[in-house]
Structures are given as structure tokens and as C-alpha cells.
Image (cartoon, helix red, strand yellow):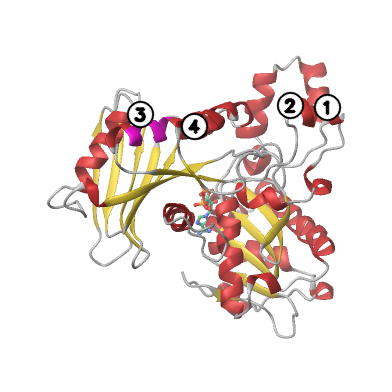
Amino acid sequence: MKILVINCGSSSFKYQLLDMNSDKVMCSGLVERIGEKVGSLTHKKDPGTDIERKINEESPFPDHTAGMTRVMALLTDPVLGVIKDLSEIKGCGHRTVQGGEEFTQSTLITDEVLEVIQRLSPLAPLHNPAAIQGIRVIMKLLPNCPSVAVFDTEFHTTMPSKAYMYAVPYEFYEKLRVRRYGFHGTSHAYVAAKAAEFLGKKQADVNVITCHLGNGCSISAVKGGKCIDTSMGLTPLAGVIMGSRCGDIDPAILIYLARQTGMSIEKIDDTLNRKSGLKGVCGFNDMRDIHTACDKGDEKAELALNMFCYSIKKYIGSYYAVLGRVDALIFTAGIGENDSLVRELVCADMEGLGISIDLAANAARSSAIRDISGKGGKVKALVIPTNEELAIAKSTLQVLEGKKPDSDL
Ligand code: ADP
């Protein structure tokens, strides 16, 4: 059984074809700069293996259909392809950022479902229209292949109202749907399930704090397999400090900026989303560049690193209080999986909470799930590589097979 996974942006998309009998990624790729004079495509057959074959193409892709058409040709290419015929693809899973309160689980796409996703677009103006575009292209190019929407928000729909409501006039919620939704749900769900498996326990018996630290960063409190709170909010701008997003700030800063500088809403939006976070403080948004700068004595880089780790630590503390008992603290995504110094700084001085890490285990590099806990710590500190594409493919398969999606991935 082969499932195609699409993660579509406004001028790019990523794809993976997975063999669900073995969970193996048969091929993966990225099409970028759609609509520009020259676009680019990277396609990898057997990615990450000894027999990986990779091509890069530069060519114009006037729209998503053109890019996807080229991908379809590559999937069946005699040399770079992995299937003989497109009919071998039994379903397509689409990463869809905003599912609102309407979608509490992954859903087979119909015209009605598309309409609802469209209606939710004001809540995710960059993401939902892009996902819709991807869905429409696949429906056109693979008319017999069912499409499934897998929502970033669905894992967080179990949050209680006291966690998702904001203390603003109630009608903002009723009329404008202003509430916390949370994002990166597929990743939080995946690593929380993997942690239970790693600990040899049922998900229902395990409480975890999941730290997804990539370009975007979010933290979730997961009680017995269900999300009870998460750091991102109405949008992915909230929560911990991120590469170029500010995370939690005093909302009055926006008002102050507008009054003092006359900045427009668009300018404030752009500044807080793209010019803030680590980048705003020190000029770098990639953690690897920050470490290099720190090694050269760059004080702003040092400050950005310390602010980042401190903001994560504060969330861990508050979610510890919310959960009451924590079995594991999980690090995942680009920074979470690779950055031992960030993990060390985040976990420093938390012995009182039963959290400590073993420096040697923490420093060892590996792509496997690993326990980096210090001796005697009652909370396991785990590094769990996330795999959002596999999670999306599994959800897609469950929907197609008519099984109720759950987080027992
Ligand atoms: P996304 O959120 O876009 O999926 P990733 O999860 O791939 O991103 O994370 C990307 C980020 O991870 C990069 O911006 C970089 O800061 C960080 N990163 C990747 N590799 C390393 C590394 N070896 N050490 C420190 N940070 C890393």
C-alpha cells in the first residue's frame, strides 16, 4: 500500500511517497519558487539510504499543477521513479494547518470538507489556501486517488476550555473564533506515542511534555495520550521564542509600537513573524549560526540562546504543574534532536523536579530514539526524532481503512 504525502506552501511543496507495509520512504522531494521565472525541484529516490539517488532541476513551474505534473512523471520514471503506474498510489495525505473546532480528526476530503477548510482560511491565511491548492491539484491529476486532510490542530482539540480560551470578551470567541488552537499536532502526537512505546507503557498511563523545537517551536502537555495544553495559540506566533517569531510578548507592545512609530498592522505582522525571535535579538535564526557566533564571543547570540532556553524551561515548569506527574520530557525536531547544548541548558537546575540529563548520553549523536536522563531523575529525558510525514501517512491510511484515527501510531 503506497501513500503520497503532500505539504503544500503558497509557492512550494514537499512530497513523500511511503510504502506503508514497511513504513519506508520510497522517494521524497521539494518543489520551490513556483510562479517565479525559474523554479527548482529536488527529488530523492531511496532517501537517506546507501543507494540514494538525487536530482536537482531548475525549470519554470508556473503553478502548482506544473510542479506536481513533473513530480508525477518522476514517480514513474524508469530510473528515478519508484512505481510503475500512478494507480499504485492508494491515497494522498495533505498536511492542513488549521482545522478549527470542526475537525477533531483526519478527514476524507469531499467538496463539503474543502469548503469548510476554505472557510477556516482567515485563521491561517498563509497555510489553508495553500493546502487547498495542493488538494485540488491532486484531485485533478489523480482523480481516482482519495485525499485525506490531516490537521496540525486536531491533536490539540482535546484541550479543556480553561486552556484554550483567552481572557478577552467572550463574543470574540463566539463571533470570531478567537481561541488557542495549537499547531505541530502531528509531531506532538507522534513523539508522545513513541515515548509510551519506548517506555513499554500504554499511552493512557503516560504523561509527557513534548518540546518540538525546529524553525517553529511549540511545547505540549500530554496527559494519557491526550493534549491538555500547548504553547502556540490562535496562530503559530505564540509560545516559546522561535527562529524569527517572537513567541509570547506583552500584547500591549503592539499598541505601543503602533502609537509610537505609526507602524501599520502589516508591518507589525511581518516584524513579529519574520524579524523577531532569535533573529530579532542577534541577527541569526538558525541555531547552528548562533553557536558559531557564541564561540566567537558574540554577546547578542549568547543572549538569544539563553532567552530561547529560558522560555522553554518556563513552559516545562508550567506544564509540569498542570500535569501533576510527568513521566517523560521529550525533545524533537531540528534543534530538539540535534542540539545537545540547548537540551543541557533547558534541563539545567531542574533536579528538584526530577529532571536531569546525563551529559555523555546527551552529547552522543544518533538518529535513534534515546534516553538522555541522568541517574536518579524520576522524569525520563528522551530525544525522539519526529516523522510528520509518516504520521500523516498513517492517519491517511486509517481514514481510508475506516479505522478511527488514534494516536497509537
Ligand atoms: P521545520 O520547523 O522547518 O520543520 P526543522 O525541524 O528541520 O525545521 O528544524 C530546523 C532548525 O533546526 C534549523 O533552523 C536549525 O536552527 C536547527 N538545527 C538543525 N540541525 C541542527 C544542529 N545540528 N544543531 C543545532 N540546530 C540544528
Q: Which of marks 3 and 4 is nearer the N terminus?
A: 3
Could you give the CA–CA distance between mark 1 and mark 4, rounded to whole angstroms?
A: 27 Å
- Residue highlighted by disc 4: 114
Nearest to the eye among marks 3 and 4: give it.
Answer: 4
Side (left or right) of 25 relative to 375: left
Region rendered in magenta: 133-139
Give yes or no for contact between labels 2 and 1 (Cβ–Cβ under 8 Å): yes
Q: Residue 165: name its quadrant.
A: top right
Could you say which is closer to the camera, residue 316 or residue 280?
316
Q: Residues within 10 Å of mark 2 (few under 14, many from 20)?
A: few
Give yes or no for contact between labels 1 and 4 (Cβ–Cβ under 8 Å): no
Q: Does the residue labelled 2 lie within 8 Å of ligand 1?
A: no
Rendered location of residue 100, percent (x, y): 64, 38
Name the residue located 64 percent from the left edge and 40 percent from the top edge: 236
Could you give the CA–CA distance between mark 3 and mark 4, rounded to whole angstroms?
A: 23 Å
Residue 176 marker = 2
Name the residue located 68 percent from the left edge and 70 percent from the top edge: 204
Side (left or right) of 52 relative to 218: left
Outermost bottom residue: 376
- Residue highlighted by disc 1: 171
Rendered location of residue 54, percent (x, y): 24, 52
Q: Earlier in the sequence, mark 1 or mark 3?
A: 3
